[in-house]
Amino acid sequence: MKHPQLRYSLRQLRYFVATAETLSFTAAAKALHISQPSISTALAELEACFDVQLFIRHHASGLSLTQAGQEMLGKARAVLKNAEELQEAARDIDAGVSGNIALGCMTSLAPPLLPGLISRFMHAHGNITFRTLEAHQDHLLAGLHDGSLDLALTYSIDLTDNIDFQPLMTLPPYVILPKKHSLANNRTVSLASLQHVPYVMLDLPHSREYFSRLFEPLGERPVPIFQSAQPEVVRGLVANGLGYSILNFPLKSTRTVDGAEFAVRHFREKVAATTLGIAQASGMKPRRVVQRFAEFCRKHILSQYA
């Protein structure tokens, strides 16, 4: 059987992806350490090969992707990943794994989880590099959909049908209080006892709604007096006596970066928990190195926090 001859190259696809991500010939050329004319020529040849226009060239404001370009971007990333996997397999049949992993992580999970996880995996597999994205759920799911992320460590919140989710552990929410607050003298804290305490909210999409919903049985949601999208800022505000907050990932330390301390107390009532897990795009076979890292994540997280 005669196979049709390919008229495009991996080099052209790599130039296309880099340009689509930067929407600039100049920025793409700088990132790839080649000349701008080389980028322009390669992309013109690629458009001629596919017989579609991939970019709209704007005289004053750079580039934008056409609809065809947007549809081709995910497919081009997939081809490049498959090519990388083929090269890895040839090089590492008996020598372990190598390659780059694009890892996403929920913003609130990243500080306590990512550094140790990545460090331990790289120590065991010296040829691995990482590109990380700390973001909220919508951005993580978008990255999985368009192929810019291999996998994401996140919660089972608002997952879409085209996402495969491997649950790792259930995380019930808990309260953090100033260490000297009167409620910190109790082993557990009721929802009602917090109604007149200033609320410091972790201001992330999905998280703020999830924590606020815990108070629906009381008929009134808490109104935050302070809010921040940075978990460390939230913990610092609480530790410095400005109110309470709610978190759900277990912490190794109750001391903040400025040396203040907070207390951790569980809820007296049974409250809705979230599930931490590994999210990946459905229907996309992960590369071998990604599979190995996902298994490492499962073992590491369960051994450290379960």
Image (tube, helix red, strand yellow):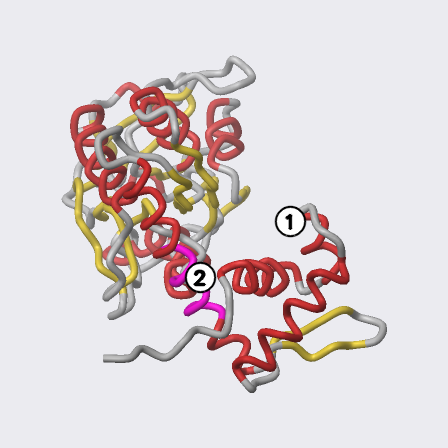
Find numbered disc 1 in the image and state the secondary structure of the residue it sits on.
helix
Q: Quadrant of the C terminus?
A: top left
Does residue 183 show up? no
Q: Are marks 1 and 2 in contact (CB under 8 Å)?
A: no
Q: Main secondary structure of the magenta part?
A: helix
Q: Earlier in the sequence, mark 1 or mark 2?
A: 1
Report which residue position mark 1 lands on.
Answer: 32
Q: Quadrant of the N terminus?
A: bottom left
Count of numbered tags: 2
Quarter assignment of residue 276: top left
Q: Position of residue 15 (x, y in %)?
A: 60, 60
The residue type indicated by label 2 comes to Arg
Does residue 54 show up? yes
In the depicted view, which residue is nearer to us: 228 or 170? 170
Q: Residues within 10 Å of mark 1 (few under 14, many from 20)?
A: some
In the depicted view, which residue is nearer to us: 19 or 169? 19
For image coordinates 35% across by 35% down, the residue present is 98
Q: Is residue 161 above or below residue 232?
A: below
Q: Quick check: is 289 in the magenta stretch?
A: no
Q: Give me the C-alpha separation between circle 1 and circle 2.
A: 16 Å
For image coordinates 31% across by 56% down, the residue present is 213
Q: Which residues are magenta?
A: 73-81
Q: Position of residue 179 (x, y in %)?
A: 40, 18
Q: Position of residue 7 (x, y in %)?
A: 49, 74
Report which residue position mark 2 lands on.
Answer: 77
Looking at the image, residue 167 sits to the left or right of residue 280; the answer is left
For image coordinates 74% across by 77% down, the residue present is 57
**Going by the picture, which residue comes out furthest to the top?**
259
Q: Position of residue 76 (x, y in %)?
A: 45, 66
